[in-house]
Image (tube, coloured by chain):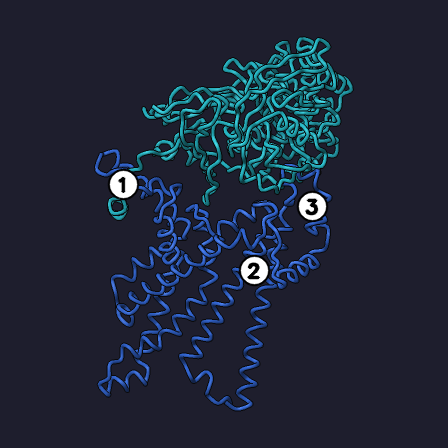
């Protein structure tokens, strides 16, 4: 690697770090601003809030200007201290409140991404470059927003199961009635609906179809085909970074969908906690979840860039003009 | 097709022994009677904690953790003999120290308990022996047992004063009640199991509080047998639940009433003629009809209350009289709207709590009624924090639609005394102040009754609010639960007697 390449790589790394930092600070600032703009404050939601107002305003820096509060929180977070929950679990460390739900949400998110990518790849592989009867139903189904799909799924499953139970055809399923009964089905639905709804699947299928069609007609694939070599593994290998980039682009979108699904399906997770914390004005929790989510999205993009660079040597070794 | 096949595929074994599950719109934030603020908390406390006295089925005070009470002749002290052999859920013995601690904790200024008012009448509490306490009162008390319903807390668990809301007790509560908290679950539900060492063990072995924030979905879950009890059924759900043979409906009265409050610091609404005119333009029975059934009230007590003054007449709708009052107050009618002296339409903002069930129906109906009479109404639905900021702190409203709920004491001091913390409308009457002060210190029930009936009539005449109604409540309970009797305020007071059929 030449000095010039090293400098370019350094500059690229700096750009990525800058983008990463901007995302974190931007998310924190935006969330703080949004919570601040809503009428009332967290103290209003505490039963004995008024008697404790002076003390809590001091402890939570409520009287200070917004930029100062943002800076104080960021400095404290950089030092590893995310503070304590204000209203959801008053006094409990945010890191402790967040640990379990964050892990659960992360797993759901990864499962949904994998499901979406897997199904989209299977469909796109089949339909790329030619007409397919599957394309239309997939697009129609995928157009529905996730909250609507979740409500339909819950109502449909409950109503049909109830009819079957009343008719004596089945015993009461353990998951009945959704979403109040804790069951694996709720998580399963969340993953499937997140992978499918709000155009997540149809968008991915369309983009992958384009990419597959392009790759099938790429000169190196045509050359390989001419040599009688198997081309599918080659196309799939070259599709990996493309798929990763497409998923990374949609990551924030998936995160938003997960918040809604966790709320609708009553799933414990960072999304439902964010929803509750926003309503309860638990600023410490809102900031931690918001910034954590920003970090996940930024890291996802970083990973996708790294994968692209790894899979496509031209990006790191090609001489620049 | 998918909807039919999936349940078949996913069906699993039927659960055999499920707890009795009841729904709350909102799970209790913390379980500590020192900081109780919501009805969901009060109901849970009724299962887990006990007081020295409690209501019997005729709503008379009956000993609970107390065994007997002996009142001194001067009525300034009472000796309370405590029930022996009572244990806390962690196995420790209950004794006089717990009673002393509970009174001190509730009265402690630094603890800032929301229950401070319940012990303010006790000046001193001392232990005569481990199972006897002596209470000294601020003023003579005729019936102190009626005020000894506050929950007793375990000294060994809460330790030193002051107690903070963040004390770990909030989600590891220990009481002496018939059920103990088993777990706070991830889905915000709370599991309770029967306390086997209770002095009068309950029949139901397990209970579960489930948070179902969508009230519309609660009755569906009851029909689906995913819930066994609804504390309050929405009027529109009464018919389908009544028709289900697996569900029983239980009517019960609550000490709560609805009102439309006037902001008396508003220059227009300060004028009693304008308030009366607005009240005369509203057809209250028509407002009530779409949301259920109930009794109209003319003042700040429920009709069955001993303090309710039945001599106060109900205000009938009278647009002509309302028009005359508005003209007298300087308003004119242009054929469509009422205009003030500057020619601007008489316009009022009507704020209501977004989470107050069925309030939207009432607000829309009220808006329509007043607009038909030429008054412009701008409805606002405020969430909890905004409500507290706008209504409680800033008094930034014209009219508010809300309700007040009371326990058996029906103490309206905070709502109507000029120094009352919940007197958002800004009502001030020297006579009412004096009557309320006297009623708080009166120990003779008959005198108190007369004082508060007078409060009722004075307030009704001053019209700081339009008093609306007290709603009929129905609880819905699965028919698998028998011997159900419901306490009008705390709901679960007599749940120990409930059985599983």
Q: Chain of mark 1?
A: B
Marks 2 and 3 in Cβ contact (< 8 Å): no
Label 1: few (<14), some (14–19) or many (≥20) C-alpha neighbours in 10 Å = few
Q: Residue at x 22, y 34 (%)?
A: A168
| Vertical comparison of A48 with B134: above or below | below
**How many angstroms separate mark 2 from mark 3 (CA)?**
23 Å
Relative to residue B464, is residue B87 drawn left or right? left
Q: Position of residue A267 (x, y in %)?
A: 43, 48
Near-viewer residue (B50 or A22): B50
| Residue drawn at 37 percent across, 73 percent down | A240
Residue A56 is marked as 3
Residue A291's disc number: 2
Single out the residue that lies furthest toward the right: B430
| Foreground disc of the pair 1, 2 | 1
Q: Are marks 1 and 2 on the same chain?
A: no
Residue B340 to residue B441: above or below: below
Foreground disc of the pair 1, 3: 1
| Figure colour of chain A | blue
Judged left or right of residue B427, residue B249 is left
Chain B on-screen colour:
cyan
Look at the numbered disc 2 and give the secondary structure of its residue. Answer: helix
Q: Upstream in the sequence, badge 2 or badge 3?
A: 3
Nearest the eye: A192 or A102: A102
Which residue lies under the disc numbered 1?
B13
């Amino acid at each position: 690697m030449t000095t010039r390449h090293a400098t370019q790589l350094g500059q690229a790394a700096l750009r990525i770090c800058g983008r990463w930092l901007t995302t974190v600070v931007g998310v924190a600032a935006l969330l703080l601003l949004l919570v601040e703009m809503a009428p009332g404050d967290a103290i209003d939601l505490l039963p004995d809030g008024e008697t404790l107002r002076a003390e809590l305003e001091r402890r939570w820096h409520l009287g200070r200007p917004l930029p100062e509060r943002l800076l104080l929180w960021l400095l404290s977070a950089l030092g590893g201290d995310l503070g304590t929950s204000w209203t959801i679990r008053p006094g409990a460390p945010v890191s402790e409140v967040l640990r379990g739900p964050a892990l659960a949400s992360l797993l759901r998110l990864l499962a949904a991404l994998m499901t979406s990518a897997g199904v989209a790849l299977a469909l796109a592989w089949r339909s790329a470059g030619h007409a397919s009867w599957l394309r239309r139903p997939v697009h129609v189904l995928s157009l529905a927003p996730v909250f609507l799909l979740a409500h339909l799924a819950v109502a449909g499953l409950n109503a049909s199961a109830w009819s079957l139970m009343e008719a004596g055809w089945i015993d009461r399923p353990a998951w009945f009635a959704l979403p109040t009964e804790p069951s694996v089905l709720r998580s399963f639905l969340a993953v499937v609906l997140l992978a499918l709804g709000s155009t997540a699947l149809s968008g991915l299928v369309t983009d992958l179809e384009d990419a597959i069609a392009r790759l099938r007609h790429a000169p190196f694939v045509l050359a390989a085909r001419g040599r009688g070599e198997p081309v599918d593994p080659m196309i799939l290998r070259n599709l990996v970074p493309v798929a990763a980039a497409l998923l990374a682009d949609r990551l924030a979108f998936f995160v938003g969908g997960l918040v809604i699904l966790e709320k609708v399906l009553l799933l414990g997770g960072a999304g439902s906690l964010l929803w509750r914390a926003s309503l309860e004005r638990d600023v410490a929790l809102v900031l931690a979840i918001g910034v954590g989510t920003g970090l996940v999205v930024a890291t996802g993009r970083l990973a996708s860039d790294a994968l692209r660079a790894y899979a496509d040597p031209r990006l790191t070794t090609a001489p620049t003009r | 097709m998918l909807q039919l096949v999936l349940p078949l595929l996913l069906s699993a074994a039927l659960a055999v022994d499920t707890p009795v599950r009841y729904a709350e719109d909102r799970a209790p934030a913390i379980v500590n009677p020192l900081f109780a603020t919501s009805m969901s908390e009060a109901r849970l406390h009724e299962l887990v904690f006990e007081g020295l006295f409690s209501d019997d089925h005729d709503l008379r005070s009956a000993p609970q953790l107390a065994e007997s009470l002996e009142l001194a002749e001067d009525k300034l002290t009472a000796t309370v003999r405590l029930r022996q052999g009572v244990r806390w859920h962690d196995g420790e013995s209950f004794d006089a120290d717990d009673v002393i601690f509970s009174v001190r904790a509730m009265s402690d200024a630094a603890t800032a308990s929301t229950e401070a008012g319940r012990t303010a009448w006790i000046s001193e509490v001392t232990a005569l022996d481990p199972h006897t306490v002596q209470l000294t009162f601020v003023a003579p008390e005729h019936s102190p047992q009626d005020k000894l319903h506050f929950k007793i807390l375990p000294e060994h668990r809460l330790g030193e004063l002051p107690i903070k809301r963040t004390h770990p007790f909030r989600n590891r509560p220990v009481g002496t009640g018939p059920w103990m908290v088993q777990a706070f679950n991830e889905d915000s539900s709370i599991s309770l199991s029967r306390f086997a060492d209770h002095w009068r063990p309950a029949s139901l072995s397990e209970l579960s509080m489930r948070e179902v924030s969508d009230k519309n979905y609660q009755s569906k879950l009851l029909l689906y047998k995913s819930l066994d009890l609804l504390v309050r059924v929405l009027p529109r759900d009464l018919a389908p639940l009544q028709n289900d043979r697996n569900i029983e409906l239980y009517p019960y009265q609550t000490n709560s009433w609805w009102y439309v409050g006037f902001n008396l610091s508003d220059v227009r609404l300060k004028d009693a003629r304008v308030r009366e005119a607005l009240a005369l333009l509203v057809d209250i029975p028509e407002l009530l009809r779409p949301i259920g059934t109930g009794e109209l009230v003319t003042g700040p007590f429920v009709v069955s209350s001993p303090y309710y003054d039945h001599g106060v007449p109900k205000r009938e709708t009278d647009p002509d009289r309302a028009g005359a009052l508005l003209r007298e107050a300087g308003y004119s009618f242009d054929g469509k709207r009422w205009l003030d002296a500057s020619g601007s339409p008489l316009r009022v903002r009507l704020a209501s709590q977004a989470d107050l069930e069925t309030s939207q129906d009432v607000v829309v109906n009220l808006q329509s009624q007043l607009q038909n009479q030429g008054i412009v109404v701008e409805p606002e639905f405020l969430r909890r924090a905004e409500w507290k900021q706008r209504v409680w702190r800033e008094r930034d409203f014209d009219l508010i639609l809300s309700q007040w709920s009371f326990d058996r004491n029906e103490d309206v001091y905070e709502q109507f005394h000029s120094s009352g913390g919940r007197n958002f409308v800004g009502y001030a009457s020297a006579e009412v102040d004096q009557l309320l002060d006297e009623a708080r210190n009166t120990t003779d029930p008959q005198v108190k009754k007369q004082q508060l009936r007078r409060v009722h009539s004075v307030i009704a005449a001053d019209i700081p609010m339009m008093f609306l109604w007290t709603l009929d409540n129905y609880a819905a309970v699965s028919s698998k639960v028998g011997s159900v009797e419901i306490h009008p305020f705390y709901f679960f007071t007599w749940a120990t007697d409930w059985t599983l059929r």
